C-alpha cells in the first residue's frame, strides 16, 4: 500500500476531505512535536504548541503554493509559533521576576543527571542536527521520512546524524559508550 503524496492529500483537504488532513497530521505530528519540544523543553507545552501549529496550518493551507513542500512549510510555521511562545514566556518572566525568585529557592525534584546532561548538550547543537536527532531517535521516524521532510539526500541525512553524534561524544566526556 503506497502513501499518497503531500500534494494529493492537500488537494483532498482543500476539496473538503478532513480525513486527508488527519493523514497529514499523522505523518508530521512527531516532527512538529520534536521542534516544539526543542524550544520548550517541556512535553505538555510542546503538545499544546503542536496542536496550535496544526490549527494554523489548516487555516492557511490554501496559501501554500508548493504543495509538495508541506513539511518544510509546516516546520516554518512551527518555528514561528515557537518563537512567539518563547517571547511571550520571556515577557511573563520579566513581569513576574519577584515570584520567580521565590520559586527558585524551592527544592527541585530529583532527576537523572545523565539524561539531563544529554538534554542540555543536545540544545547546544546546531538546529538541523537537533531536529535530526529528535525526529529520528526520539520520535522514531524512519530515516527516509525525516530526510525527505528536511530536504536532504539519504547520504546527507546520515552525515548530519553522524556529525551530531560526534559533537555529543565530545560534549559528554566519559559517556561515549552510552551514546
Image (cartoon, rainbow, N blue to C red):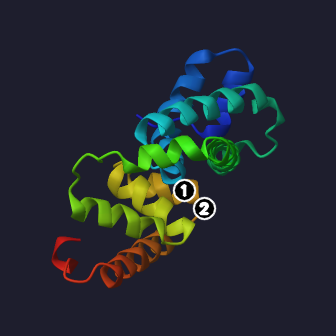
Q: Quadrant of residue 96?
A: top right
> Foreground: 120 or 23?
120
Residue 148's disc is 1
Q: Is residue 174 above or below residue 67?
A: below
**From this viewpoint, which residue is outermost toward the left?**
177
Give the position of the C terminus as an image quadrant. Answer: bottom left
Q: Residues within 10 Å of mark 1 (few under 14, many from 20)?
A: some
> Foreground: 113 or 60?
113
For mark 2, give the secondary structure. Answer: loop
For mark 1, give the secondary structure. Answer: helix
Q: Position of residue 52 (x, y in %)?
A: 62, 30
Query: In whole angstroms, how far apart are the C-alphas of marks 1 and 2?
Result: 5 Å
Q: Position of residue 54 (x, y in %)?
A: 62, 31
Give the position of the N terminus as an image quadrant. Answer: top left
Write the residue at 55% across / 35% down.
50
Residue 151's disc is 2
Q: Position of residue 119 (x, y in %)?
A: 36, 61
Amino acid at each position: 500500500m503506497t502513501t499518497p503524496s503531500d500534494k494529493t492529500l492537500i488537494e483532498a483537504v482543500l476539496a473538503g476531505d478532513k480525513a486527508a488532513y488527519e493523514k497529514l497530521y499523522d505523518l508530521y505530528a512527531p516532527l512538529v512535536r520534536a521542534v516544539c519540544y526543542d524550544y520548550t523543553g517541556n512535553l505538555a507545552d510542546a503538545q499544546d504548541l503542536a496542536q496550535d501549529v496544526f490549527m494554523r496550518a489548516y487555516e492557511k493551507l490554501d496559501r501554500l503554493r508548493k504543495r509538495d513542500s508541506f513539511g518544510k512549510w509546516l516546520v516554518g510555521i512551527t518555528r514561528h509559533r515557537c518563537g512567539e511562545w518563547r517571547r511571550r514566556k520571556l515577557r511573563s518572566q520579566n513581569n513576574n521576576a519577584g515570584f520567580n525568585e521565590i520559586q527558585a529557592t524551592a527544592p527541585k525534584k530529583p532527576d537523572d543527571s545523565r539524561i539531563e546532561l544529554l538534554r542540555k548538550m543536545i540544545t547546544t547543537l546546531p538546529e538541523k542536527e537537533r531536529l535530526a536527532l529528535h525526529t529520528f531517535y526520539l520520535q522514531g521516524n524512519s530515516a527516509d521520512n525525516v530526510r525527505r521532510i528536511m530536504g536532504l539526500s539519504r547520504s546527507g541525512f546520515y552525515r548530519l546524524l553522524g556529525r551530531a553524534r560526534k559533537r555529543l561524544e565530545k560534549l559528554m566526556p566519559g559517556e561515549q559508550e552510552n551514546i
